[in-house]
Image: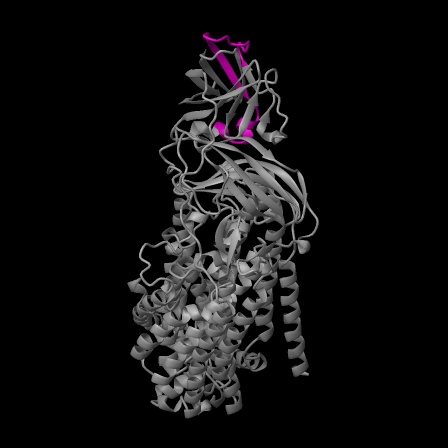
């Protein structure tokens, strides 16, 4: 009866473990990001992302999409963040929901870290292959050594299908095509299981006999030499020699099976190709800039001079990935994420075409809930109260030019 | 009154009680040591252990044995000198690997979906068996430290090579050569873990050409000897049964 | 007085030396509870735990944090208070059999401590690694921290201190003073919790990359070593139980 009871107890214990493990493997869906935590000055004064394009909004498992665009490495880079001398083009996504099939800066593949120059613009592209179904927020992202992750804009992307169907075929230089998703898995399980079993066997040899209390009593009473028998020593010798033999044989057979192996590849990529933006013919001087806390609006007084040969209008102010547009000049047709787009968020006191050779001082207001939602308003709590951003001007032919602004910001509380 | 003088009613009951304690002690020792060893190992050598694109010929081979010989040395110091039980190293490593495998499977794979072939742990068992074997055969802390410590370092890389060699097969990828392990690190995005934090392979002197791993293993074995001594004495201290007066604390 | 002693003896004769039911029920409690926690992480980690500024984060994670903290303080107060309040004031005069029974109960506590330490120091600590290497840390109270630091660590602290208090209040062995290694094995891992202060300070100031072997984390390593104090506890216990069994085992 007692035996039966013990068995029931043991079985229910096993069932409990199984149920618990099963619950641990539950597959959830949906997600978002983490960029709002980053200090506003970090997002405004480090990497400026623009011309972003997510090639698809819905992708099937195994299909690909690209995230491409440009980024400007801000010349007024803040002192508290290390310069991007070692930087890695990353993707902000919740785990490997997409695998990164390729990523390029200026046409060069960047599987490793690269060195970027302040004041330069780079073109980038990331090729992503869908792996795990769900609605995911996919961000452009740059990691900077000594600065941490600098997250760019993110867009919701839906992956449909089943992760079970995902494959990641790769052809090696030895001519073999493998599926990297499952490659070497059985081999890994085999060796770990074998060695774990040998370890357990060693333990089992010793725990099958009474352990702590009798052995402690024997040692206390001076009989420690009786505790290790000749058989124990033989077993010990067999395990030790056997282990060394298995390691040696396994090593030899592995080398025979994989005669060609190479070390891990590492090293910094330098001299990345920059993207030449047309030289701006417009100059902008920030006379003053304030952030009105109650109105969630930033106001700048800009003195704009047009040194070109065509009249220009201000179409966009872009800071920390939020785009404030004057819809009379520019409308977004790229499907930029709604939450980062203020389609009518830019008001210019006089945005009539500024003729060549003319100078005009204007009041520019950038207002949108994004200041709060994206916690850019927290700029007033930063230790270095400056703002920065990109201004995009358009001439009569629609040609665009980019001008950067970088100036102190005064908060207005009343 | 005579009943109160003996805790058990028969020799058979005494044997059973002693055996029951064996299991409870072993269970507790196994899981508490597992907890301590795991937190120690993951925070001193964890990154090399988590990902295949960290398992290189230089630093993984050097760091992993040095930081992992600690708990085995300490637990051997208790189990051998107090009980003549030569499984201190194996019990530690079995615990550590159980903790790691449960976590890699249920969390790295089960929660964040990294393939297991990318985030499996390093194999430490060959070194542990040999360390215990040498202690049993020699009965000497010094010999175990010198021979066992050296073996611990030397056996690490060959003990893992059959598992990782297939991942060191080269591949040409968009015009660059990399190993399959590098490709795993590149394909399976770790948002919070950029490439540059990898501490692998970067070194200027490659005098020994492709034979970097044996040099690293030899150096690692040397440091493992020293760490073994140090941790043996830590182990003795942790195994002490001293009581202190409450006035002293 | 005599009658009381007799009744104690009679009860003692009835009760088993080791209450296996309690042990398995205790183990099941931890495993089922943590199974549920892992399920909760799986579901609400992804759906509500990635953006600490979102309202659902407050609902599913910050509220979880507040509730667990209150429950932990209540549990610790009640449990420790009860063990202390119901202490045996005549602990030196118990029978050897009762002493042996209490050693078994003490070991049930230690088995629970082992389970709690495993979940805290191994399972949830390395799990925190995979979460932070996967997502971008945007608060001190990430979902994995809310579970690791503020749930699994307090639980092993509560369990460890309970085991210690049980030994101190009910076992003659522990009346000779304070067992050094027992304190190391309970207080050391406890110190991992205050060490979270160092961890968060570092991560908040420098927004470090998620390098697990960063020196900032070595405080956890140092206090993790203290778990080895369990060897001292084993040795004290083996000596004490040996005294009780020596004659009969010979």
Residue displayed at 40% across by 54% down: B199
| Residue B2 appears in view | yes
Where residue A62 sits: x, y (%)? 66, 49
Look at the picture and state if A43 lies above or below A284. below
Q: In this view, does B6 lie to the left or right of C14?
A: left
* Residue range highlighted in magenta: A348-377
Q: Does the magenta stretch include residue A109?
A: no
Q: Is residue A372 magenta?
A: yes
Residue displayed at 56% across by 13% down: A396
Where residue C92 sits: x, y (%)? 41, 76
Look at the picture and state if A323 lies above or below C107. above
Task: Kindly indicate the quadrant of the structure image that contains residue C59.
Answer: top right
Task: Kindly indicate the quadrant of the structure image that contains residue A127.
Answer: top right
Q: Quick one: which residue is furthest to the right in this view?
A: A161
Residue displayed at 37% across by 55% down: C218
Look at the picture and state if A234 lies above or below C220. below
In front of the other: B153 or B165: B165
Residue displayed at 68% across by 54% down: A165
Where residue B90 sits: x, y (%)? 45, 75
In front of the other: A322 or A5: A322
In front of the other: C148 or C203: C203
Task: Kindly indicate the quadrant of the structure image that contains residue A75.
Answer: top left
Q: In this view, does B211 lie to the left or right of A396?
A: left
Where residue B181 sits: x, y (%)? 50, 57
């Amino acid at each position: 009866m007692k035996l039966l009871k013990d068995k029931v107890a043991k079985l229910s214990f096993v069932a409990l473990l199984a149920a618990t493990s099963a619950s641990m493997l539950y597959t959830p869906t949906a997600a978002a990001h983490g960029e709002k935590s980053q200090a506003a000055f970090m997002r405004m004064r480090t990497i400026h992302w623009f011309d972003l394009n997510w090639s698809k909004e819905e992708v099937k498992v195994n299909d690909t999409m690209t995230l491409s665009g440009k980024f400007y490495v801000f010349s007024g880079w803040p002192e508290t963040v290390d310069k991007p001398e070692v930087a890695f083009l990353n993707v902000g996504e919740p785990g490997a929901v997409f695998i990164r099939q390729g990523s390029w800066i200026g046409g060069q593949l960047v599987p490793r870290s690269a060195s970027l120059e302040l004041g330069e613009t780079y073109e980038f592209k990331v090729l992503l292959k869908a792996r795990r179904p769900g609605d995911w927020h996919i961000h452009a992202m740059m990691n900077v050594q000594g600065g941490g992750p600098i997250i760019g804009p993110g867009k919701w992307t839906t992956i449909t299908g089943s992760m079970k169907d995902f494959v990641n075929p790769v052809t090696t230089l030895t001519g073999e095509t493998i599926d990297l998703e499952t490659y070497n898995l059985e081999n890994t399980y085999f060796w770990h299981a074998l060695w774990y079993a040998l370890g357990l066997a060693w333990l089992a040899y010793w725990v099958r006999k009474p352990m702590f209390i009798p052995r402690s009593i024997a040692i206390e009473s001076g009989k420690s030499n009786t505790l290790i028998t000749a058989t124990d020593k033989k077993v010990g010798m067999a395990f030790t020699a056997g282990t060394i033999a298995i390691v040696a044989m396994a090593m030899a057979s592995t080398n025979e099976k994989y005669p060609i192996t190479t070390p891990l590849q590492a090293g910094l990529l330098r001299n990345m190709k920059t993207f030449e933006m047309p030289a701006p013919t417009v100059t902008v001087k920030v006379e003053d800039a304030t952030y009105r806390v109650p109105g969630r609006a930033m106001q700048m007084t800009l003195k704009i001079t047009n040194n070109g040969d065509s009249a220009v209008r201000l179409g966009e102010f872009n800071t920390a990935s939020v785009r404030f547009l004057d819809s009379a000049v520019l409308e977004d047709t790229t499907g930029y994420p709604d939450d980062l787009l203020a389609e009518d968020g830019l008001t210019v006191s006089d945005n009539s075409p500024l003729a060549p050779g003319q100078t005009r001082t204007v009041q520019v207001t950038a207002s949108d809930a994004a200041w709060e939602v994206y916690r850019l308003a927290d700029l007033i709590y930063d230790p270095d109260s400056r703002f920065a951003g990109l201004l995009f001007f358009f001439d009569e032919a629609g040609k665009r030019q980019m001008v950067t602004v970088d100036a102190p910001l005064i908060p207005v509380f009343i | 009154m005579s009943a109160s003088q003996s805790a058990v009613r028969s020799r058979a009951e005494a044997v059973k009680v002693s055996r029951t304690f064996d299991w409870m002690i072993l269970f507790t020792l196994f899981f508490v040591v597992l907890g301590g060893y795991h937190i120690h190992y993951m925070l001193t050598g964890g990154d090399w252990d988590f990902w295949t694109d960290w398992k290189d010929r230089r630093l993984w081979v050097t760091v992993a044995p040095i930081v992992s010989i600690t708990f085995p040395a300490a637990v051997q110091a208790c189990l051998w000198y107090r009980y003549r039980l030569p499984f201190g190293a194996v019990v530690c490593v079995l615990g550590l690997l159980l903790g790691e495998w449960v976590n890699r499977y249920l969390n790295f794979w089960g929660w964040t979906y990294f393939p297991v072939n990318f985030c499996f742990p390093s194999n430490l068992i060959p070194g542990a068996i040999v360390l215990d074997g040498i202690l049993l055969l020699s009965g000497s802390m010094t010999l175990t430290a010198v021979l066992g410590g050296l073996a611990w370092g030397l056996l690490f890389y060959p003990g893992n090579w059959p598992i990782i060699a297939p991942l060191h097969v080269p591949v040409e990828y968009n015009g660059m050569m990399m190993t399959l392990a590098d490709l795993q690190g590149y394909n399976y995005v770790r948002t919070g873990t950029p490439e540059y934090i990898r501490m692998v392979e970067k070194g200027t002197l490659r005098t020994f050409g492709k034979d970097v791993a044996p040099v690293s293993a030899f150096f690692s074995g040397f440091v493992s000897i020293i760490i073994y001594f140090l941790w043996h004495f830590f182990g003795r201290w942790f195994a002490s049964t001293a009581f202190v007066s409450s006035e002293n604390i | 007085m005599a009658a009381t002693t007799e009744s104690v003896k009679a009860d003692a004769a009835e009760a088993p030396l080791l209450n296996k039911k309690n042990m398995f029920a205790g183990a099941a409690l931890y495993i089922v509870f943590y199974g549920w926690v892992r399920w909760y992480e799986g579901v609400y980690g992804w759906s509500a735990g990635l953006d600490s500024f979102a309202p659902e984060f407050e609902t599913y994670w910050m509220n979880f944090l507040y509730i667990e903290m209150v429950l932990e303080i209540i549990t610790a107060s009640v449990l420790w208070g009860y063990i202390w309040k119901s202490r045996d004031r005549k602990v030196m005069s118990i029978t050897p059999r009762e002493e042996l029974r209490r050693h078994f109960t003490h070991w049930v506590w230690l088995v629970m401590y082992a389970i709690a330490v495993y979940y805290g120091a191994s399972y949830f600590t390395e799990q925190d690694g995979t979460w932070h290497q996967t997502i971008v840390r945007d608060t001190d109270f990430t979902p994995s921290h809310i579970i690791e630091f503020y749930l699994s660590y307090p639980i092993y602290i509560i369990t460890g201190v309970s085991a210690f208090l049980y030994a101190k209040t009910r076992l003659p062995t522990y009346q000779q003073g304070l067992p050094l290694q027992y304190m190391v094995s309970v207080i050391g891992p406890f110190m991992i919790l205050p060490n979270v202060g160092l961890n968060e300070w570092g991560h908040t100031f420098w927004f470090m990359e998620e390098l697990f072997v960063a020196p900032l984390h070595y405080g956890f390593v140092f206090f993790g070593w203290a778990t080895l104090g369990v060897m001292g506890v084993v040795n004290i216990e083996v000596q004490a139980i040996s005294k009780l069994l020596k004659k009969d085992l010979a």
